[in-house]
Amino acid sequence: QVQLVESGGGLVQAGGSLRLSCTASRSFSSYAMGWFRQAPGKEREFVAGINKSGNIRRYADGVKGRFTISRDNTKNTVYLQMNSLKPEDTAVYYCAAGASTSELDYWGQGTQVTVSS
């Protein structure tokens, strides 16, 4: 089992940037990783995913070209660089780990991102 801790959330103005980090409690090179978000009153939705080696990434349509997922297996950390933020990006962001980006079994506690207009 692996525990995940997100950080880097906060309040930013529209057009600004944030970088989220998610650090695992132990070596996570055997896990695919994903970022999800949940806005108030909405269901949790997929944002970005990255495979175990980091050479395959996929994104939700609404964040393509603005967000970048990456990982550093030497630091057991996955990142989500978020640029050109919009008010509709406001949500709690969660990272997750699993056998693949569609089989994610372990979840962090989330970090709040608020984008003001």
Image (spheres, helix red, strand yellow):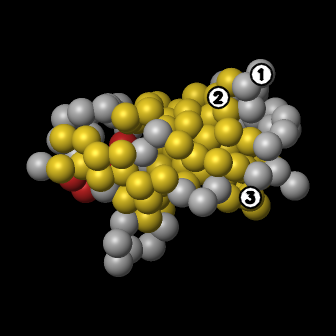
Q: Amino acid at mark 1?
A: Thr
Residue pictured at 79% horizontal, 43% vertical: 25
Q: Amino acid at mark 3?
A: Tyr
In the picture, measured across the screen, residue 71 lies left or right of residue 114, that is right
What mark, if any, has residue 74 been given in the picture? 1
Q: Residue furthest bottom?
A: 41
| Distance in Å between CA atoms under marks 2 and 1 | 9 Å
| Distance in Å between CA atoms under marks 3 and 1 | 19 Å
Residue pictured at 84% horizontal, 39% vertical: 26
In the picture, measured across the screen, residue 107 lies left or right of residue 36, that is right
Rate crowding at label 1 as few (under 14), some (14 to 19) or many (20 or more) other CA atoms within 10 Å: few
- Which image quarter holds the N terminus? bottom right
Examine the rendering and report whether any part of residue 14 can be seen: yes
Residue pictured at 73% horizontal, 25% vertical: 75
Tell me the element at label 2.
Answer: strand
Mark 2 vs 3: CB contact within 8 A: no
* Residue at the disc numbered 2: 71
Q: Amino acid at mark 2?
A: Arg
| On screen, residue 64 above or below 110 | above
Q: Earlier in the sequence, mark 2 or mark 3?
A: 2
Q: Position of residue 111 (x, y in %)?
A: 48, 53
Rate crowding at label 2 as few (under 14), some (14 to 19) or many (20 or more) other CA atoms within 10 Å: many
Numbered circles on residues, count: 3
Q: Position of residue 9 (x, y in %)?
A: 42, 45
Tell me the element at label 3.
Answer: strand
Q: Position of residue 19 (x, y in %)?
A: 44, 33
Rate crowding at label 3 as few (under 14), some (14 to 19) or many (20 or more) other CA atoms within 10 Å: some
* Residue at the disc numbered 3: 106
